[in-house]
Amino acid sequence: MILEITTFDHPALRTPGARVERIDDSLRKLAADMIETMRAAEGLGLAAQQVGMPLQLFVLDVPQLKKRPSAMRIAGKRADFEALMPLVLINAKVETFGRVHTESEGCLSFPELSANVSRLLSVRVHALTLEGSSVEFEADGLLARAIQHELDHTLGILYIDRAVPEDRMDFSSDIQRLIRPVS
Ligand SMILES: [Zn+2]
């Protein structure tokens, strides 16, 4: 089922996600609906906040792109991340490392808007899968950026909060009013 995507000042977008305590049929249904919704909207990721459910849950569908490549390592070995998509990550803990990279980002909750955001190039992720098993991997590039963007959603942080100052000034006053400084 395709769900309605929350936008702009919807309160769910500012609500930090509760930890998922139980992976049951309703959570599996939510994750399946989020994947369907993300794909219908042609997004690379979608967090539960974006369908009005403040939970520590997000889904990803990141392709390998020549211009914005990604990589994944599991136990130090290069992994075929495309074969793992769509990826559902629950209660994710993310450490960032590497150099700072500034690239354009968009968000399904802010249609037709984009802005440059500085993020670190790599992440180390610990999370639960929908099967309830724990996963640990490292990612670089666009995949690492998408993970940082979605993790932010689960904390109630939006990419407009992190946009570089020049691009923030280009936002309409309606969008600028929604920015909350990241502490
Ligand atoms: Zn987003």
Image: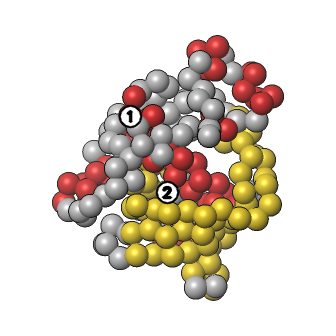
Q: CA distance from mark 1 to mark 2?
A: 19 Å
Is residue 116 positioned above or below 62 on the image?
Answer: above
**What residue did someone put label 2 on?**
60
Residue type at tag 1: Ala
Q: Position of residue 86 (x, y in %)?
A: 45, 62
Residue neighbourhood size for the residue with mark 2, other residues' Cα within 10 Å, grouped as few (<14), some (14–19), many (≥20)? many
Is residue 7 in view? yes
Q: Position of residue 123 (x, y in %)?
A: 63, 65
Residue type at tag 2: Leu
Is residue 170 positioned above or below 57 on the image?
Answer: above
Q: Mark 1 or mark 2: which comes first in sequence?
A: 1
Residue found at x 58% / y 48%: 149
Q: Position of residue 182 (x, y in %)?
A: 62, 38
User: In the figure, is residue 36 to the left or right of 29?
Assistant: right
**What residue did someone put label 1 on?**
12
- Give residue 13's quadrant in the image: top left
Residue found at x 64% / y 54%: 145
Residue found at x 41% / y 27%: 10
Identity of the residue furthest to the top in this view: 173
Q: Nearer the viewer, mark 1 or mark 2?
A: 1
In the foreground, 183 or 125: 183
Is residue 89 positioned above or below 161 on the image?
Answer: below
In the foreground, 110 or 154: 154
- Give residue 68's quadrant in the image: bottom right
Cβ at disc 2 under 8 Å from ligand 1: no
| Quarter in which the C terminus is drawn | top right
